[in-house]
Amino acid sequence: TKRGAGSAALKDLSLMSKVVENVIKSVDNTPITIKMRSGWDSENIVAIDAGLMLQEIGIKAITLHARTSKQSYSGSADWSLIKDLKNNLHIPVIGNGDVINLESYIKMSNETNCDGIMIGRGALGNPWIFMKINSYLKNGKINKGPSISDIVQISINHIDLLIKNKSSTASVNLSKKHLNYYLKNFHN
């Protein structure tokens, strides 16, 4: 963003337009999608303007992370922005931000009517979130989720994969990070 790339393009929609047009032209017949934030800051929410422009240029779907660039990952995602974008476009809109469990998945889906939901940080230490959502969508059942022994086993498997694929220093640092996610919210 310091060089005007990434989410800084939200400050200059004409630059965003030029970049996206060139990408679309250069990848003949490959559908291009985009993930963006709602704007640069709370005074500059441009999701709908950017979305309409991107749709016109030929983007095939938009994922909206419903926070501004300045927010980073703090505060709450504003799902009403996803709903507004969905109501203004005819291409698929995928919602993103603050989906951490089945309940928040259902709530975003109901509140925004978006075409899909992207889960990021909600899957850290909780890869079972996808199993729970799939089970609910397929048969309406709410899966209990993993047992403590399941969580311990996946933690060990994760560390083994880190050791196999990373340096020892990276393995230790990443293990601490991911174990913190796996073991978060344990009762007692």
Image (spheres, rainbow, N blue to C red):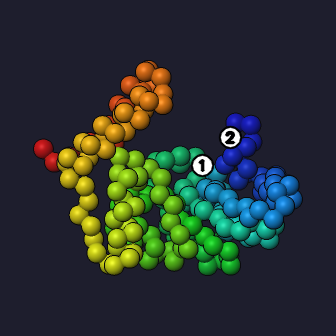
Q: Name the kind of residue labelled 2 in the image.
A: Thr
> Of helix, strand and loop, which one carries label 1?
loop
Circle 2 residue: 1
Q: Give the percent coordinates (x, y) of residue 4.
A: 75, 42
Q: Nearer the viewer, residue 99 or 182?
A: 182
Q: Name the kind of residue labelled 1 in the image.
A: Ser
Confirm whether residue 127 shows in the render: yes
Q: Nearer the viewer, residue 48 or 143?
A: 143
Q: Residues within 10 Å of mark 2 (few under 14, many from 20)?
A: few
**139 above or below 23?**
below
Q: Which corner quadrant of the image does residue 107 belong to?
A: bottom left
Number of residue marks: 2
- The residue at 26%/59% (across/down) is 145
Checking the image for residue 164, the label placed there is: none
Q: Give the percent coordinates (x, y) of residue 146.
A: 25, 55
Q: Give the percent coordinates (x, y) of residue 53.
A: 77, 67
Indicate the quadrant containing the C terminus: top left, top right, bottom left or bottom right: top left
- The residue at 61%/79% (across/down) is 87
Circle 1 residue: 69
Indicate the quadrant containing the N terminus: top left, top right, bottom left or bottom right: top right
> Of helix, strand and loop, which one carries label 2?
loop
Question: Would you say the residues marked 2 and 1 are in contact, meaning their CB atoms lie under 8 Å apart?
Answer: yes
Left or right: where 11 falls relative to 69 = right
Q: Give the percent coordinates (x, y) of residue 94.
A: 57, 67
Confirm whether residue 177 shows in the render: no
Left or right: where 167 falls relative to 104 = right
**152 above or below 166?**
below
